[in-house]
Amino acid sequence: MQIDIWSDIACPWCYVGKRRFEQALSRFEHRDRVTVQWRSFELDPGAPAVQAEPQAELLARKYRMPLAQAEAMNARMTAAAAEEGLDFHFERVKVGNTFDAHRLVHLAHASGLQDAMKERLMRAYLTEGLAIGTQEVLQRLAEDVGLDAEQVRATLASDRFADEVRGEENDARELGITGVPFFVLGGKYGVSGAQSPDTLLEAIRQAYAETEPKVTMLGGDAAACGPDGCEIR
C-alpha cells in the first residue's frame, strides 16, 4: 500500500506530523508492505528566497495580532514539538521560499534518500535556523544526506523537477487539500493534520484492510506442499 504525504518544509505541524506518522508506522504489522511518498505543497509560493523580517513579526503581521501573541503561539508550537522529541527554535528561523527545497526532495527520491532529505530540510529550517531558500544552503544539506554534489548543483541551476513540484501542488488542489500535513492512504482515504500516532495507526490499518487484495478460502484444508516438504496423510 502506498501512503502519499503532502507537506511543506516550512510547516512546523508537518514536522510534528512526520514524527507521529513514523511512530504509527513503526507499530503497523505490515510495515514492510507500505511505501511512503512525500508530495510537494508550498504554504507561501510567492515568498522570496529569504525574508529579512523575523518569523514572529511576519506571523503577527499575517494574522493581524500583537507580536506578543505571535510569540506565545510559537511557544505553544515549540512545546508540542518537544513532546515528539523535536527541538524548535523560531527565533532562529529564516523564512523563505521552499520551491527549490521541494525539487531536492524529488532528486533524492531517485536515490532512495527522499525521507532523509525531507528530514534534513525540516531540521535545518525549524531547529538550526538555516536559510533553506538559498541554493548554497540547499547544496550543503543535499550533500549531508549523500546526494551527488554535481547532480545537486546541476539540478539547482536548472528547472529540473519544477514540473513535478507544480504537478503535485495541482494534485493537492484537485483533492481539495488546503492545509498540511495531509495523508492519502492507498489512494483512497485522506487524513488531515498532525493526528496522534494512535489515530494514524487506526487509519493505516483500516486503509490496508480495504485496499490490499485478500484471498477467501473455500473447501477447507487438504494435502499440500510447502517450504518444508509435502504433507503425507
Image: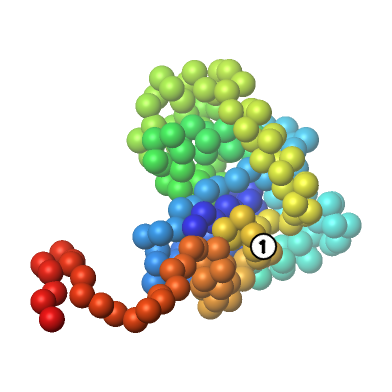
Give the residue number, with chain letter if any, for mark 1. Answer: 190
Q: Seen in the image, is 113 located left or right of residue 132?
A: left
In the foreground, 189 or 95: 189
Image vertical order of residue 57 relative to residue 213, above or below: above
Name the residue rendered at 58%, 60% in the picture.
185
Q: What element carries label 1?
A: strand
Work out whether residue 224 or residue 29 is closer to the camera in this orientation and state it: 224
Residue drawn where x is 59% and y is 38% of the image: 102
Q: Tell me, what colour scheme is on the image?
A: rainbow
Looking at the image, residue 150 lies above or below residue 187: above
* Number of dots carrying numbers: 1
- Choose between 35 and 114: the one closer to the eye: 35
Image coordinates for residue 217, horizontal then vertical, percent: 40, 75
**Residue drawn where x is 56% and y is 68% of the image:** 210
| Three-letter code, disc 1 | Gly
- Neighbour tally class for label 1: few under 14, some 14-19, many 20 plus, Cα within 10 Å: some
Residue 206 image offset from top left, x and y in percent = 56, 73
Can residue 113 be seen here? The reply is: yes
Give the position of the C terminus as an image quadrant: bottom left
Q: Quadrant of residue 194?
A: bottom right
View extreme (right): residue: 64
The residue lying toward the viewer, choosing from 24 and 137, is 24
The reply to whether residue 57 is in sight is no
Residue 87 location (% of width, % of height): 50, 61
Q: Measuring 53% from the left and 36% from the top, which residue is drawn there? A: 106
